[in-house]
Amino acid sequence: MLKKLRRRMGNLFPWLALSMLCGCAAVERPEAVGSGRLWRLPLQPGDIVDLHTGQKLSLEDLINALGKVRLIYVGEVHARMADHEVQHKVIQGLSELGKKIGIGLEMLPRTEQTALDLWVHGALDEEAFLEAAGWERHWGFPFDGYRPVFALAREKNLPMRALNAPPTVVRKVSRQGLDSLSDEERRQIAHHFFMDDAAHRAYIQEEFRMHMPGGIRDFESFYQAQLVWDETMAESLAVWMVQEPLDHVVVLAGKGHVNQRFGIPERVRRRLEHRYAVVVPVATDEIPEAVTPDVGDYLVVTAAEKPAPGHGKRLGLSLQKNPGGKGLRVLEVVPNSRAEKAGFLPGDLLVAVDGQPVEDLEALHRRFRSEQKGVAFTLERGGSVMEIKVDFEP
């Protein structure tokens, strides 16, 4: 009984500590942010720039600088291999300093932590891990880009932490707002939401105007959905930092969540005062005329990269390997997605793509890496076989 109580108190302590800290942590941004400095530099692949000084650094210089802060964010475009290579170099470099490193992941919700632990400890092979963690269901981007980081974590026994909220909860908020969540759903996301950052709201409003996502109730529900992501990941990180005495945590997340600092980074700092740094990978064809420390702390320049085959071919399906045998079972169809418009329904059994049998998610990914724009899906529904064609032209 005493052991059980200790375990319960051990789990409760970080939440109690964060509840107290949330009310007193500073909410101002670091002094270096918004300094007004602009750097107009000739840049090429491999260059690394300290955005506070404008000086170019070596990779060794960057790693040594990052070794002085506890939390490091390395943003990504999810399908860009060069961004993943930067993430791998940062983690490898810090681990070679002899420090205890943890890796935080946007890619998986907190509910899948057990699968991550089993991966790091060598208890699951790649296929079993992807199935157990629901990689395709939760994330959907090919595992290829992330494989080197996951392999490094396994090789060096670096703890990994799933940070995000379940996608189903985020989608419900985007359609119906936070008030629509059940008590159980509310427990799966952050306890505290900070909605007073005008710059962050303006940034998200611009995204909303540019993309006008389908199936979204209005801007307010869209903004709340973005906060579910950012606040849940921030809370997960702050709790982890209290729980585990790691020297450094490297966070892998989309650039929209870390650049400009108002997504995850400052939301963690509101909960727990600490030093952090934001590393911004950027391709040569994306570099603005002038770079500024407003975007982050270190710029890492990569070569221009053609989007990976299949990039942009998002169907809008949640799929699971069919436990009864062949094919993939459709669990959910995202509202206003290509899949919904084409006629997919929950419960459909996807058995072939362009006439080729599909036995697992990786086989489906392989088909999507082709350059073709139109794809024919063979489904079984209610005892009948049917074909649905989807056009992936922009």
Image (spheres, rainbow, N blue to C red):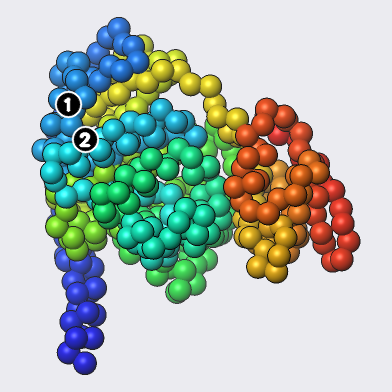
Q: In the rendered view, does 342 fall on the left or right side of 45?
A: right
Q: Residue at x 71, y 34 (%)?
A: 392
Q: Label 1: which residue? A: 60
Residue nearest the viewer, comparing 136 with 121: 121
Q: Position of residue 141 (x, y in %)?
A: 53, 43
Quadrant in the picture for the C terminus: top right
The type of residue carrying mark 1 is Glu
Question: What numbered label is drawn on residue 308?
Answer: none
Q: Residues within 10 Å of mark 2 (few under 14, many from 20)?
A: some
Q: Residue at x 23, y 74 (%)?
A: 12
Q: Residue at x 53, y 22 (%)?
A: 306
Question: What numbered label is drawn on residue 93?
Answer: 2
Q: Position of residue 383 (x, y in %)?
A: 87, 66
For residue 339, above or below residue 239: above
Instruction: Determine whether the residue tagged by mark 1 lies in a helix, strand or loop.
Output: helix
The type of residue carrying mark 2 is Gly
Residue nearest the viewer, comparing 271 with 351: 351
Quadrant in the picture for the N terminus: bottom left
| Residue 75 visible at all | yes
Q: In the rendered view, does 244 fall on the left or right side of 307?
A: left
